[in-house]
Image: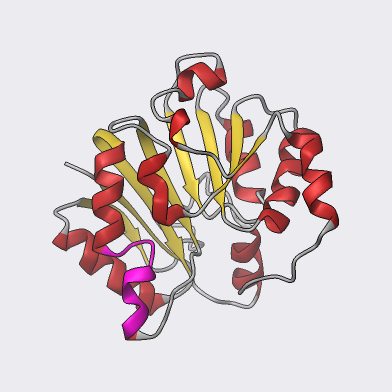
Amino acid sequence: MRLRRKPWIDKAIQEYDDIVLVHPNDSLQGRWQEIFGRTAPLFVELGTGKGQFLAELAECHPEVNFIGIEAQQGVLFYAAQKIRAKALANVRLLVFDINHILDIFAPGEVARFYINFCDPWPKARHAKRRLTHLNFLEKYRVLLQPKGELFFKTDNRALFDFSLEQFSMAGLQLQHITYDLHAPEAPGHEGNIMTEYERKFSARGMRINRVEAKFL
């Protein structure tokens, strides 16, 4: 769902120009270690939203460089606030369209992608817009290092089943599949960091699906 544009954010987000890159271009390809000022694994969240998941994850793993990508600047502003509040030097946020992701990373530059509660695009004619569609998976394959990973969570069972099929078609190795992440015995339950959507959905009793996929 597209949120109503908030004109004041155009100026307010400039206060976070050390964290947020607005509409980055291909000049960043292969330069992310330079931008972070250190050599570290690069993990990327596709669709960061308001940043609750990314902020907590980056705080727990200071040894990793994190990038959060979100197309809606009005949403990413709140993620920037969370990153600044925690004084996290290992996070950058991009206002960017994921369809063009090949433009901002070099081949093999990313170690892991996270996709959390992405738009399910439920109509069949929109299947190619799903971030777990085979077309996107082939883009991720280019950008991931050998044996790179994709961690995926969703409350939408139809999208989850579709995604598992797409992962298999792409020849990915699947592990830690669960249809109820919040069950104490579920793989991935221990240490799970919830997104804003996840907290809302789970509070309604909705089950959360999760899988880890490895690109071979």
* Residue 61 locus on image (x, y percent): 55, 29
Q: Quadrant of the C terminus?
A: top left
- Would you say residue 127 sits in the magenta stretch? yes
- Would you say residue 22 sits in the magenta stretch? no
* Residue 11 locus on image (x, y percent): 83, 46
Residue 91, by quadrant, is: top right
- Name the residue rendered at 33%, 75% in the picture: 127
Relative to 141, say whether 121 is above or below: below
- Name the residue rendered at 66%, 69% in the picture: 200
* Residue 154 locus on image (x, y percent): 46, 66
Q: Which residues are magenta?
A: 125-133
Relative to 22, say whether 165 is above or below: below
Q: Is residue 168 visible?
A: yes
Nearest to the observer: residue 4 or residue 191: 4
Q: Is residue 39 left or right of residue 10?
A: left
- Name the residue rendered at 32%, 71% in the picture: 128
Residue 41, by quadrant, is: top left
* Residue 88 locus on image (x, y percent): 68, 28
Q: Is residue 188 visible?
A: no
- Name the residue rendered at 44%, 60% in the picture: 153
